[in-house]
Amino acid sequence: MQNNLYHGMTETELDEAYNNTAIVKDFDGLLKKLQARSRALYKKYHWIRDRSYGRKPRQRYDFLSSGIKNSPTYIFIHGGYWTNCNKEDFAFIAQGPHANGMNVILAEYTLAPDATMTEIVNEIGHLIKKIKDDQDFLGVRDSPLYLAGHSAGGHLAALYRSHHAISRVHMISALVDLNPISMCWLQDKLKLTPVEIKLYSPLFHLEKGAPTLVSVGGDELPELIRQSSCYADELVRIDKSVKMFTLPMATHFTILDDLANPDGSLMKQFMTLKKPGTPKIY
């Protein structure tokens, strides 16, 4: 008989509660479709590909210009539970922010077990610094930087919402409490330490920062919905610029279809973010 580990769940139940791909009928087929859409978007526009921000092979990013002077730059960090996927898998999402007048950056990072959580988190800091250093090269000297991420990428974005260079944050189906992650199947590769769980769980570090949209799909796994809702409920008490949005009938993956839609709800909600008492930000 298994012991209850977290919120009354056993290890087996936690494994199921955080297995987003298991509930997709044909995840491999879905991923291939997303990759095909991404390849098409790479071909549609002129990109700067694989700009390096560090010495490791995966420390690189892709850049798509809006062609509009002083337009903001939407930096997207992909998901995959810190252990899987590539920026190229999710390039299709760039259509949404790009059509709304934003430059788009697709960020890559080293995956576990080749990197610890500490190293992965630090890589995002290096990424932001490099993008700031590259602003003249990219032609975006006066461009506000928006930091976004899906799932594990949303977790990484949340950790930098108080960074001085970030003007706005978009968390999509983000993971903000690493405690249950350390108790389920993901721990085999992540090998989270007690110190990392405490340091890198956004839920334990609530502070004022850039205006933030916390978004989640209404048909996602209950634990994913709970994490986003709890985080937003707690954070809004400290920072009134935080907004929670649940996209009805969206799963962990179909929510990205809405992000890719120029007229989608996520983009509309994101564009309304502002600091309390200030006009709407671009």
Image (spheres, helix red, strand yellow):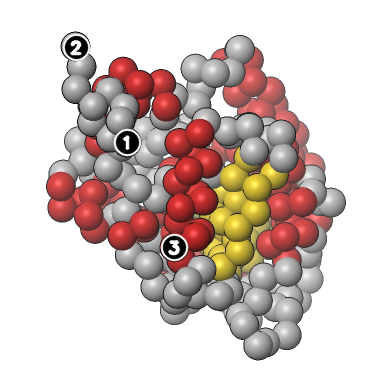
What's the residue type where badge 2 is placed?
Answer: Met
Q: Which residue is mark 1?
A: 7
Residue 209 point in image, percent of width and height: 47, 74
**As drawn, is 280 to the left or to the right of 182?**
right
What element does badge 1 sit on? Answer: loop
Residue 20 point in image, percent of width and height: 50, 26
> Measured along the vertical axis of the image, is residue 77 above or below residue 205?
above
Q: Which residue is mark 3?
A: 234
What element does badge 2 sit on? Answer: loop
Distance CA(mark 2)–CA(mark 1) = 17 Å
Q: Residue at x 77, y 51 (%)?
A: 265
**As drawn, is 97 to the left or to the right of 185?**
right
In this orientation, which residue lies closer to the viewer: 133 or 93?
93
Q: Residue at x 23, y 31 (%)?
A: 5
Mark 2 / mark 3, whichever is N-terminal: 2
Residue 134 in view, yes or no: no
Residue 164: quadrant of the picture: bottom left
Q: Residue at x 44, y 63 (%)?
A: 234
> Measured along the vertical axis of the image, is residue 245 above or below residue 274?
above
**As drawn, is 21 to the left or to the right of 95?**
left
In this orientation, which residue lies closer to the viewer: 256 or 32?
256
Mark 2 / mark 1, whichever is N-terminal: 2
Q: Which label is found at residue 1?
A: 2
What's the residue type where badge 3 is placed?
Answer: Glu
Quarter of the image where the N terminus is located: top left
> Measured along the vertical axis of the image, is residue 278 above or below residue 37?
below
What element does badge 3 sit on? Answer: helix
Distance CA(mark 1)–CA(mark 3) = 18 Å
Q: Residue at x 29, y 55 (%)?
A: 200
